[in-house]
Amino acid sequence: MQLASITSRNPQLIEALVALSQRADYQENSDILLDELSSISVLVAKKFTNDRTADGLLEAHYLTVGCISLGISQAGIPDNAEAKLAFLLREGAEYVFQRGFRHIKALSNLPYATFVSDFDKDPYVLQRNLKALFSEICRTSPHSSWTGDDLFNSQLVERKNTQKIVEFAKWLRRNHFSGPVKDSDLDAHAVIAIAIIFSIIADDRIVARTGQKEIESLIQLARASKLDINVGWNKLIKKTPLEYQPILLERIKNIQDTIIKKILSKAKVNAVVTEIQDYYASTEVDIEYP
């Protein structure tokens, strides 16, 4: 995977304010912005830091600078100080702050991991995660370089990819051969791995959840038959919606030379079952006996 390019720069808000200071008639606009920024910082202090201490107000100021800078960076305007200043003056600092915060909130609603549980939906956890993300991306000193917009963009791409993996696993669960799997906890990578492993026997089933006995039976059947594993995989690929096929193909590539080879080898069945449980199927295996 190619790493995102991170560029250090002054916060977008500071670039706009510097452009304003270079105008001959800056006083009226600067007074308006100062009032707006002060009001926003107080609001942030009340909700996210501490409005009763100097440190809390200073932290709120840092968050305000970054959040407004994020709102400017995501507005689709030219990357120059005059364009940023024009946008800030036209829309107002409060609106631009709200715009930046909505981006943070939307990002926090995307899954950051491929393991999903009811714990992730707890209101306290959701609020905690939102505050942490807000601080991670938006906190910046006016005198420091800022990479919050690049960090936001890279996390957005990463979380959207994670969301697609989770959605693919949910699709596999809905199409499980014996009926939908309705367990609220979900290990998306494990579901996908199980589907790939069981598809090697080319029996047209989609297997999204399994048990120890079924894994043992699969290994014994695979070793007793002369399988062309690509036949089964091609069947699974054809059944899979187009938007999920790249995920499936990448995962097949990742495991075809590891656990699939061990399934077809002469390794002890119990050892292979244990490896599948520990490294591939995880909590998506129903434990039937010790």
Image (spheres, rainbow, N blue to C red):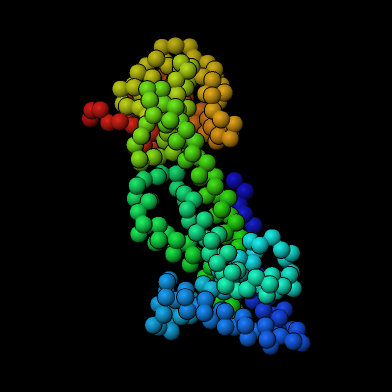
Residue 5 makes an appearance in the image = yes
Q: Quadrant of residue 225?
A: top left
Q: Residue at point 47% right, 53% down?
A: 109
Residue 8 makes an appearance in the image = no
Q: Is residue 209 above or below residue 34?
A: above
Is 285 or 80 nearer to us in this picture?
80
Q: Quadrant of residue 127?
A: bottom left
Q: Where is residue 274 in the image (x, y as percent from the top left)?
A: 33, 31
Residue 19 is left or right of residue 286, and the answer is right
Task: Quarter of the image for the C terminus: give it.
Answer: top left
Residue 27 is left or right of residue 36, and the answer is right
Q: Given the current orientation, which residue lies at the most extreme right position? A: 24
Q: Residue at point 61% right, 60% down?
A: 150
Residue 191 is left or right of residue 153, and the answer is left
Q: Is residue 238 above or below residue 17?
A: above
Is 127 or 231 nearer to us in this picture?
127
Q: Position of residue 38 (x, y in %)?
A: 53, 81
Q: Residue at point 54% right, 73% down?
A: 64
Q: Residue at point 74% right, 87% down?
A: 25
Q: Where is residue 91 in the image (x, y as percent from the top left)?
A: 65, 70
Q: Is residue 169 above or below residue 85?
A: above
Q: Where is residue 54 in the image (x, y as percent from the top left)?
A: 43, 84
Q: In which quarter of the image is residue 32?
A: bottom right
